[in-house]
Amino acid sequence: MQETIDRITETVKNICATLPENVTLVAAAKTRTLEEVQAVIQAGITHIGYNYIQEALPIIQTVGNSAIWHMIGHLQRNKAKYVVEFFNMCQTVDSWRLAKYLDDRCRMMNRTMPVLIEINSGKESNKTGVLPNDVDDLIKNMSELKNLQVQGMMTMGPRFGEPEKSRPYFKLTREVFERIKSKNIPNIEMKYLSMGMSNSYQVAIEEGANIVRIGTRLFGERS
Ligand SMILES: *Cc1c(COP(=O)(O)O)cnc(C)c1O
Protein backbone atom coordinates (compact mmCIF):
# COMPACT_ATOMS: atom_id res chain seq x y z
CA MET A 1 0.00 0.00 0.00
CA GLN A 2 2.69 2.48 1.02
CA GLU A 3 4.62 1.63 -2.14
CA THR A 4 1.56 2.33 -4.27
CA ILE A 5 0.99 5.63 -2.50
CA ASP A 6 4.63 6.69 -2.90
CA ARG A 7 4.74 5.78 -6.59
CA ILE A 8 1.47 7.47 -7.41
CA THR A 9 2.27 10.56 -5.33
CA GLU A 10 5.48 10.99 -7.28
CA THR A 11 3.74 10.55 -10.63
CA VAL A 12 0.97 12.98 -9.74
CA LYS A 13 3.57 15.55 -8.78
CA ASN A 14 5.42 15.11 -12.07
CA ILE A 15 2.31 15.30 -14.23
CA CYS A 16 0.88 18.28 -12.38
CA ALA A 17 4.16 20.13 -12.87
CA THR A 18 3.58 19.91 -16.63
CA LEU A 19 -0.01 21.21 -16.50
CA PRO A 20 -0.93 24.88 -16.86
CA GLU A 21 -2.91 26.15 -13.88
CA ASN A 22 -6.23 26.30 -15.72
CA VAL A 23 -6.12 22.63 -16.71
CA THR A 24 -7.98 20.03 -14.65
CA LEU A 25 -6.62 16.52 -14.49
CA VAL A 26 -9.22 13.76 -14.44
CA ALA A 27 -7.72 10.43 -13.38
CA ALA A 28 -9.08 7.76 -15.75
CA ALA A 29 -9.47 4.96 -13.24
CA LYS A 30 -10.78 1.99 -15.24
CA THR A 31 -9.31 -1.35 -14.06
CA ARG A 32 -7.57 0.27 -11.07
CA THR A 33 -7.91 -0.99 -7.52
CA LEU A 34 -9.54 0.88 -4.68
CA GLU A 35 -6.07 1.36 -3.18
CA GLU A 36 -4.79 3.00 -6.35
CA VAL A 37 -7.78 5.31 -6.54
CA GLN A 38 -7.38 6.25 -2.90
CA ALA A 39 -3.70 6.90 -3.55
CA VAL A 40 -4.37 9.45 -6.33
CA ILE A 41 -6.89 11.19 -4.10
CA GLN A 42 -4.36 11.31 -1.28
CA ALA A 43 -1.87 12.76 -3.74
CA GLY A 44 -4.27 15.64 -4.35
CA ILE A 45 -6.30 14.59 -7.40
CA THR A 46 -9.96 15.40 -6.88
CA HIS A 47 -11.46 14.43 -10.25
CA ILE A 48 -11.89 10.74 -11.06
CA GLY A 49 -13.31 9.36 -14.32
CA TYR A 50 -14.97 6.00 -14.92
CA ASN A 51 -16.13 4.25 -18.07
CA TYR A 52 -18.38 1.63 -16.55
CA ILE A 53 -21.07 1.95 -13.93
CA GLN A 54 -20.54 -1.56 -12.53
CA GLU A 55 -16.90 -0.82 -11.88
CA ALA A 56 -17.45 2.66 -10.49
CA LEU A 57 -20.26 2.12 -8.00
CA PRO A 58 -18.40 0.10 -5.35
CA ILE A 59 -15.53 2.59 -5.46
CA ILE A 60 -17.78 5.63 -5.32
CA GLN A 61 -19.75 4.14 -2.47
CA THR A 62 -16.54 3.57 -0.52
CA VAL A 63 -14.71 6.80 -1.33
CA GLY A 64 -17.79 9.03 -1.41
CA ASN A 65 -17.61 12.75 -1.84
CA SER A 66 -13.91 13.19 -1.19
CA ALA A 67 -13.69 13.09 -5.00
CA ILE A 68 -15.64 14.50 -7.94
CA TRP A 69 -16.87 11.71 -10.21
CA HIS A 70 -16.95 11.95 -14.00
CA MET A 71 -18.61 9.51 -16.38
CA ILE A 72 -16.22 9.32 -19.35
CA GLY A 73 -17.40 6.11 -21.04
CA HIS A 74 -20.22 5.54 -23.48
CA LEU A 75 -23.46 5.55 -21.56
CA GLN A 76 -26.36 3.21 -22.20
CA ARG A 77 -29.75 4.61 -21.34
CA ASN A 78 -30.52 1.79 -18.96
CA LYS A 79 -27.49 2.83 -16.88
CA ALA A 80 -28.22 6.53 -16.99
CA LYS A 81 -30.09 6.54 -13.70
CA TYR A 82 -26.93 5.47 -11.87
CA VAL A 83 -24.99 8.32 -13.38
CA VAL A 84 -27.60 10.74 -12.12
CA GLU A 85 -27.50 9.16 -8.70
CA PHE A 86 -23.75 8.74 -8.21
CA PHE A 87 -21.78 10.98 -10.56
CA ASN A 88 -21.07 14.70 -10.54
CA MET A 89 -20.60 15.16 -14.29
CA CYS A 90 -21.32 13.20 -17.45
CA GLN A 91 -18.82 13.92 -20.25
CA THR A 92 -20.35 11.64 -22.87
CA VAL A 93 -23.75 12.94 -23.89
CA ASP A 94 -24.03 12.25 -27.62
CA SER A 95 -27.69 11.93 -28.49
CA TRP A 96 -30.99 13.64 -27.86
CA ARG A 97 -32.47 10.41 -26.52
CA LEU A 98 -29.76 10.13 -23.88
CA ALA A 99 -29.94 13.83 -23.03
CA LYS A 100 -33.71 13.68 -22.59
CA TYR A 101 -33.43 10.57 -20.49
CA LEU A 102 -30.78 12.08 -18.20
CA ASP A 103 -32.83 15.24 -17.86
CA ASP A 104 -35.94 13.26 -16.85
CA ARG A 105 -33.94 11.29 -14.32
CA CYS A 106 -32.43 14.45 -12.89
CA ARG A 107 -35.87 15.96 -12.49
CA MET A 108 -37.06 12.85 -10.61
CA MET A 109 -34.07 13.14 -8.30
CA ASN A 110 -34.48 16.86 -7.94
CA ARG A 111 -31.00 17.74 -9.16
CA THR A 112 -29.27 19.39 -12.07
CA MET A 113 -26.26 17.79 -13.70
CA PRO A 114 -23.40 19.36 -15.62
CA VAL A 115 -22.71 17.55 -18.89
CA LEU A 116 -20.31 17.72 -21.81
CA ILE A 117 -21.22 16.85 -25.39
CA GLU A 118 -19.03 14.10 -26.80
CA ILE A 119 -17.84 14.88 -30.31
CA ASN A 120 -16.99 12.14 -32.78
CA SER A 121 -14.08 14.14 -34.12
CA GLY A 122 -12.75 11.28 -36.25
CA LYS A 123 -16.17 10.93 -37.90
CA GLU A 124 -15.74 7.19 -37.49
CA SER A 125 -18.94 5.27 -38.04
CA ASN A 126 -18.26 2.75 -35.27
CA LYS A 127 -17.43 5.39 -32.67
CA THR A 128 -19.52 7.13 -30.06
CA GLY A 129 -20.03 10.86 -30.01
CA VAL A 130 -22.10 13.22 -32.08
CA LEU A 131 -20.83 14.12 -35.54
CA PRO A 132 -19.59 17.71 -35.85
CA ASN A 133 -22.38 18.48 -38.33
CA ASP A 134 -25.07 17.29 -35.93
CA VAL A 135 -23.89 19.23 -32.89
CA ASP A 136 -25.89 22.39 -33.56
CA ASP A 137 -29.24 20.61 -33.58
CA LEU A 138 -28.45 18.58 -30.48
CA ILE A 139 -27.35 21.65 -28.55
CA LYS A 140 -30.31 23.68 -29.66
CA ASN A 141 -32.62 20.98 -28.34
CA MET A 142 -30.63 20.59 -25.15
CA SER A 143 -30.86 24.26 -24.36
CA GLU A 144 -34.51 23.58 -23.48
CA LEU A 145 -33.66 21.00 -20.85
CA LYS A 146 -34.04 22.44 -17.37
CA ASN A 147 -32.09 19.85 -15.41
CA LEU A 148 -28.98 19.50 -17.57
CA GLN A 149 -26.32 22.17 -17.76
CA VAL A 150 -24.26 21.88 -20.93
CA GLN A 151 -20.79 23.11 -19.95
CA GLY A 152 -18.61 22.15 -22.89
CA MET A 153 -17.33 19.34 -25.08
CA MET A 154 -15.29 16.18 -24.91
CA THR A 155 -13.59 14.10 -27.58
CA MET A 156 -11.56 10.92 -27.81
CA GLY A 157 -10.48 11.03 -31.43
CA PRO A 158 -8.94 8.08 -33.21
CA ARG A 159 -6.23 6.28 -31.24
CA PHE A 160 -2.65 6.73 -32.45
CA GLY A 161 0.73 5.81 -31.07
CA GLU A 162 1.98 9.20 -32.11
CA PRO A 163 0.58 12.28 -30.31
CA GLU A 164 0.94 14.66 -33.27
CA LYS A 165 -1.53 12.58 -35.25
CA SER A 166 -4.25 13.51 -32.76
CA ARG A 167 -3.81 17.23 -33.35
CA PRO A 168 -6.23 17.63 -36.30
CA TYR A 169 -9.01 16.00 -34.27
CA PHE A 170 -8.39 18.23 -31.28
CA LYS A 171 -8.29 21.25 -33.59
CA LEU A 172 -11.58 20.28 -35.17
CA THR A 173 -13.23 19.83 -31.77
CA ARG A 174 -11.91 23.21 -30.65
CA GLU A 175 -13.44 24.79 -33.77
CA VAL A 176 -16.83 23.27 -33.05
CA PHE A 177 -16.50 24.42 -29.42
CA GLU A 178 -15.69 28.01 -30.41
CA ARG A 179 -18.43 28.10 -33.02
CA ILE A 180 -21.08 27.01 -30.52
CA LYS A 181 -19.67 29.37 -27.91
CA SER A 182 -19.98 32.32 -30.27
CA LYS A 183 -23.67 31.58 -30.75
CA ASN A 184 -24.40 32.47 -27.11
CA ILE A 185 -27.26 30.00 -26.81
CA PRO A 186 -29.31 30.38 -23.63
CA ASN A 187 -28.52 27.76 -21.00
CA ILE A 188 -25.48 26.53 -22.98
CA GLU A 189 -22.06 27.26 -21.55
CA MET A 190 -18.84 26.46 -23.38
CA LYS A 191 -16.25 26.52 -20.62
CA TYR A 192 -14.78 23.01 -20.53
CA LEU A 193 -12.97 21.27 -23.36
CA SER A 194 -12.03 17.72 -22.37
CA MET A 195 -9.43 16.20 -24.70
CA GLY A 196 -6.18 14.33 -24.46
CA MET A 197 -5.04 11.16 -22.74
CA SER A 198 -1.67 9.85 -21.52
CA ASN A 199 0.13 10.09 -24.83
CA SER A 200 -1.66 13.10 -26.27
CA TYR A 201 -2.53 15.45 -23.44
CA GLN A 202 0.22 17.94 -24.19
CA VAL A 203 -0.94 18.33 -27.78
CA ALA A 204 -4.51 18.60 -26.52
CA ILE A 205 -3.59 21.43 -24.15
CA GLU A 206 -1.86 23.26 -27.00
CA GLU A 207 -5.13 22.96 -28.90
CA GLY A 208 -7.17 24.39 -26.05
CA ALA A 209 -8.08 21.53 -23.73
CA ASN A 210 -8.70 22.51 -20.12
CA ILE A 211 -9.65 19.03 -18.96
CA VAL A 212 -7.30 16.11 -19.66
CA ARG A 213 -8.12 12.49 -18.86
CA ILE A 214 -5.08 10.46 -17.89
CA GLY A 215 -4.88 6.80 -16.93
CA THR A 216 -1.75 4.93 -17.96
CA ARG A 217 0.71 7.68 -17.23
CA LEU A 218 -0.73 8.11 -13.77
CA PHE A 219 -1.25 4.52 -12.65
CA GLY A 220 1.00 2.51 -14.97
CA GLU A 221 0.13 0.17 -17.83
CA ARG A 222 -3.20 -1.59 -17.60
CA SER A 223 -2.85 -5.35 -17.41
C1 LIG B 1 -8.95 5.08 -20.63
C2 LIG B 1 -9.43 6.42 -21.01
C3 LIG B 1 -8.60 7.54 -20.89
C4 LIG B 1 -7.16 7.47 -20.44
O1 LIG B 1 -6.41 6.70 -21.30
P1 LIG B 1 -4.83 6.49 -21.03
O2 LIG B 1 -4.27 6.27 -22.37
O3 LIG B 1 -4.73 5.30 -20.13
O4 LIG B 1 -4.34 7.71 -20.37
C5 LIG B 1 -9.14 8.77 -21.23
N1 LIG B 1 -10.41 8.91 -21.66
C6 LIG B 1 -11.22 7.86 -21.78
C7 LIG B 1 -12.61 8.07 -22.26
C8 LIG B 1 -10.76 6.58 -21.47
O5 LIG B 1 -11.57 5.54 -21.61
Image (spheres, grey):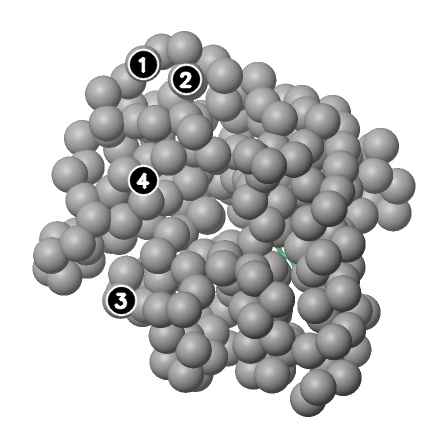
Expressed as whole percent of the image width and height from the top left, the position of residue 120 reads 57, 36
Report the Cα–Cα distance between label 4 and label 1.
20 Å
**How far apart are the alpha carbons under marks 4 and 3?**
20 Å
Task: Give me the residue at 42% from left, 60% from top.
Answer: 68
Q: Earlier in the sequence, mark 4 or mark 1?
A: 4
Where is residue 84, by image quadrant? bottom left
- Which one is earlier in the sequence, the residue at label 1 or at label 3? 3
Disc 1 Cβ-to-ligand 1 distance below 8 Å = no
**Residue count near mark 3 (Cα–Cα under 10 Å), binned few <14, some 14–19, many ≥20:** few
- Mark 2–mark 3 Cα distance, whole angstroms, equals 29 Å
Q: Which mark is residue 181?
A: 2
Amino acid of disc 4: Trp
Farthest residue toward the right? 162
- Eyeballing the image, is 16 above or below 135? below
Residue 184 badge: 1
Q: CA distance from mark 1 to mark 3?
A: 30 Å
The quarter of the picture showing ligand 1: bottom right
Disc 2 to disc 1: CB gap under 8 Å:
yes
